[in-house]
């Protein structure tokens, strides 16, 4: 009696089909992860600058200038960009600006001028996409 062991062709085809269906479900979820991670990084860095703003106010007992605010932000790649508006941060090698405002309502018409770094920062917004 010669009994052969192994899988039949139909069993292999069914397994491949099931794996294909699972891959079709999983791959789109992983494609969007990079964009979601960047959005989370921007939100996190904006939160870090907002927290640094609160700490700077408590420590200095006045509203900080943009230069003073950047000294309170902890993180890699944090700097004040000359002629730009706000605190410039690096996320994955790309520079983004966290906008700062000289009025407490964060109106777009009164962006602080960080070229001189002397305007006080009363409000910090999120990094725009």
Image (cartoon, rainbow, N blue to C red):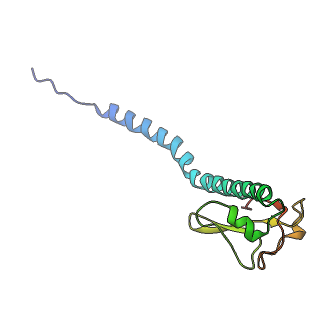
Residue 27, x across and y down, in percent? 51, 47
Left or right: residue 120 compared with residue 10:
right
The N terminus - image quarter: top left
Q: How many marks?
A: 0
Left or right: residue 78 compared with residue 52:
left
Residue 117, x across and y down, in percent? 77, 75
Residue 120, x across and y down, in percent? 84, 68
Q: Residue at x 73, y 71 (%)?
A: 67
Front residue of 22/117: it is 117
Q: Quadrant of the rendered structure where residue 82 is?
A: bottom right
Q: Quadrant of the rendered structure where residue 112 is?
A: bottom right
Front residue of 121/38: it is 121
As drawn, which residue projects farthest toward the top?
A: 1
Q: Residue at x 90, y 70 (%)?
A: 109
Front residue of 86/72: it is 72
Q: Quadrant of the rendered structure where residue 12 is?
A: top left
Q: Residue at x 75, y 79 (%)?
A: 83
The C terminus - image quarter: bottom right
Q: Is residue 82 above or below residue 6?
A: below
């Amino acid at each position: 009696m010669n009994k052969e062991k192994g899988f039949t062709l139909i069993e292999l085809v069914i397994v491949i089909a099931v794996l294909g269906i699972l891959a079709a479900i999983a791959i789109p979820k992983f494609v969007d992860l990079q964009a979601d991670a960047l959005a989370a990084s921007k939100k996190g860095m904006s939160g870090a600058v907002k927290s640094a703003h609160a700490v700077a106010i408590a420590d200095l007992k006045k509203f900080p200038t943009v230069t003073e605010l950047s000294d309170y932000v902890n993180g890699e790649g944090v700097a004040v960009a000359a002629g730009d508006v706000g605190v410039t941060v690096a996320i994955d090698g790309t520079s983004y600006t966290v906008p700062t405002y000289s009025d407490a309502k964060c109106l777009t018409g009164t962006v602080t001028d960080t070229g001189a770094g002397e305007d006080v920062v009363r409000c910090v917004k999120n990094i725009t996409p």
